[in-house]
Every structure is written in structure tokens, then in C-alpha cells.
Amino acid sequence: MATSPQNPGVVTRSAEEQKRVDRETDQLALYYHETCPLCLRVLRTSERLRLKIEKRNIRQVPAYRDQLLQGGGHCKVPCLLIQKDDGSLEWLYDSDAIMDYLEDRFA
């Protein structure tokens, strides 16, 4: 992996490596809303890492807000839902923790 010379900081990968990353991000969903500054930081990190994470806007789709409250116990964004290989779910709420997780796993 490297960064793009045209856009420093943006991760570049081979096509095969990007396919692998895309498969791994199928296990992730980001609960957010468009005016949340912390959500925007997480979204920028995701874009820089070229991650195709499902985005679930809790203001546009009330069912997402309900899922967030039922599953994670809090109606707070950003929240990254991580579906693990064993089927268990992890609800990661802190924006810094989310960005660290994404950097550690995909950078």
C-alpha cells in the first residue's frame, strides 16, 4: 500500500488488494448524520482509506436510529457496527476509536 501522488494521504492499493478490503468492509456499517462534525471526521478517514463502508444516516432513516439504540444501547453517532467472523457484533462509538480501528485494520 502507498499513498496517491496526486492526492497525498489517500491510500492506493492493487486491484486485488482493494477487492480484499472491499470484502472485509462488507462486515462494517457506519451510523452517522450529515451535520455531526465527528461523523465527518470518520467519513473523511474512510474516504482517505478508500473503504466502502455502508453508511446508515439515522436522521434520514428512523429504522437506523432504532437499530443503533437497540443494538448498541445508545443513540449516539458516529458508531461503527462491526460484524465479526463468529457472528457477534461490536458497536464502536468513539470517533477516535473508530478512526484508530480503520487505520489499524486498513492502512
Image (cartoon, rainbow, N blue to C red):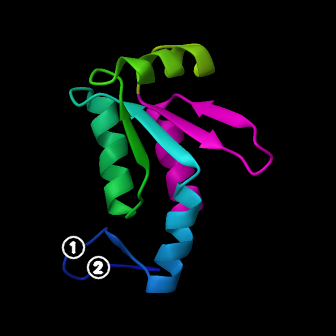
In which image quadrant can residue 48 be found? Answer: bottom left
14 lies above or below 93: below
Near-viewer residue (28 or 5): 28
The amino acid type of the residue labelled 1 equals Asn
- Residue 91 in magenta stretch: yes
Range covered by the magenta-colored residues:
78-107
Q: Is residue 18 left or right of residue 42?
A: right
Q: Is residue 47 visible?
A: yes
The residues bearing labels 2 and 1 have C-alpha atoms spaced at a distance of 5 Å
Residue at (30%, 50%) from the top-left corner? Answer: 44
Where residue 24 sits: x, y (%)?
A: 58, 61
The residue where tag 1 is placed is 7
Q: Is residue 57 left or right of residue 25?
A: left
Where residue 82 sits: x, y (%)?
A: 61, 42
Badge 2 local density, few (<14 within 10 Å), some, or many (20+)? few
Residue at (21%, 26%) from the top-left corner? Answer: 35
Q: Residue furthest right?
A: 86
The residue where tag 2 is placed is 4
31 lies above or below 1: above
Q: Is residue 85 left or right of residue 68?
A: right
Do the CB atoms of the residues marked 2 and 1 lie less than 8 Å apart? yes
In which image quadrant can residue 41 be found? Answer: top left
